[in-house]
Amino acid sequence: MADRDRYQRQMILPAFGLATQEKLLAAKVLIVGMGGLGCPVLQYLVGAGLGHIGIMDADKISLSNLHRQLLFTESEIGLLKVEQAAAKMRLLNSDVTIESYPFHIDQSNALRIISKYDLVIDATDNFPAKYLINDACLVLQKPYVFGAVSRYEGQVSVFNLAKEERSINYRDLFPEAPKTGEVPSCAEAGVIGVLPGIIGAMQAAEAIKIITGIGTPLYGRLYHYNLLQGQGFEIEIAATENRIKMNEKIFLEHIYEENEEEIDIPEISILEFNRMRALPEVFVLDVRERHEYPPIDFSDAQIPMSELQVKMHEIPDKEICIICHQGIRSVYAAQQIRKKRNLKVYSVKGGLTAYFK
Amino acid sequence: MAITVYFFGSLVDITGQSKKELNILSDTDSLNMLLQKEYPALVSTKYFIAVNQQMIKVNRELNNGDIVALMPPFSGG
């Protein structure tokens, strides 16, 4: 046991004590992202005496980081975030072992690295990484603490805490990642410096609660914080029915980041669609999620967008007309199909919204 | 007889308000359609709907006094 004076203020708390402190010292947590969220998460966990911490980020410190990443200083601009963070945290608390990973999380490293930890904290700043962490944690059955910010608002939740098939995760909120550019990043939308400090500190608190067993983690609940209004809003998350079980194979085959050139997909009008769907060589594919409505009786199959990658082989060698709610996903689905299959693929412009007009 | 709709994140930019009172509507589908008609940019925006702080995944009847929330994803860090 390390020097007790250091932790005296938290060890005298009701329901804390020595045994709880020792749980923290024995725990292993991975923080993915060492930016606005990652810095406060790391600082509070090191302060609390969390024994083993991995930090992962490929980025170097830049001047525009410093309004919110208070761990870094002007003299460190251009240096690797994880190296500077690790060096400083060793000065703060020598009880803590810090391992730095100076690269981004991806499909080739996620499972290997996450498997070494008890819990993951998502402090990343982009959707591909958030979905990748979500899915890797599902494969490995690791709980993870989600955090995200935009302008003056933030979101926090705990995912995958129950070790069961229906364990609630980020895909219950948003089954598929928004397309690049659909949701603005901090660089585009802006963020007030103190906000990731608040959300990151909340993520650290959730991690401590999960590890020590004190309190009630934000599992199954999305907490939204509006800094300008000084208001919180909590939403109970509904689990998705009949969702596919994530496994290593699906994880490794999934496309998280679209780097390829966008494939141009022909869009057809409702008039054209009605003509085509009567033809025997045409196959109508509905790519809406299973919970979406209304049900339609003129599709030949429904393969939700979230299952498309693994069910690609179920699509027959026909001309494919893809329909969805608004005609946006259907373009994306058509692109996915064209990448894997040499078929004529069309997207129904305006989707079912246009169809039922 | 009214319901209150709360908009979060980028949806506030689209609707120009964070809160809107509406005369009671039959269900969440008709509410969503009405909002998408009034604010067409919602159509191409990702969000989920919660009624009385519970996320819904299928159409749900609305009652007087219900609080509806439209929540988009955030990715910043």
Image (tube, rainbow, N blue to C red):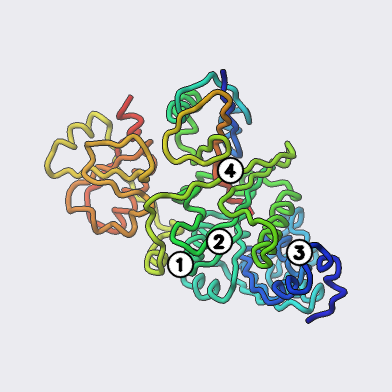
Q: In x, y percent, where is residue A227?
A: 73, 42
Question: Residue, x 64% and y 49% (percent of image)?
Answer: A149
Whether labels 3 and 2 share one chain? yes
Q: What crowding class fits label 1: few (fewer than 14 Cα within 10 Å), some (14-19), or many (20 or more)?
A: some
Give the residue pinned by disc 1.
A139
Numbered badge on residue A161: 2
Indicate which label's residue lies in the foreground, 1 or 2: 2
Q: Amino acid at mark 3?
A: Ala
Output the chain of dot 1: A
Numbered badge on residue A15: 3
Question: Residue, x 49% and y 66% (percent of image)?
Answer: A136
Whether labels 1 and 2 share one chain? yes
Q: In x, y percent, where is residue A101?
A: 61, 74
Q: Amino acid at mark 2?
A: Leu
Q: What crowding class fits label 4: few (fewer than 14 Cα within 10 Å), some (14-19), or many (20 or more)?
A: some
Q: Amino acid at mark 1?
A: Val
Q: Amino acid at mark 4?
A: Ile
Q: Which is nearer the N-term, disc 1 or disc 2?
A: 1
The CA span between labels 1 and 2 is 13 Å
Secondary structure at badge 2 equals loop
Q: Are marks 3 and 4 in contact (CB under 8 Å)?
A: no
Question: Residue, x 38% and y 64% (percent of image)?
Answer: A250
Instruction: Answer left or right for A20 relative to A265.
Output: right
The answer to whether A113 is drawn above or below residue A132 in the figure is below
Output the chain of dot 2: A
Indicate which label's residue lies in the foreground, 3 or 4: 3
Output the chain of dot 3: A
Q: Quarter holding the C terminus of chain A?
A: top left
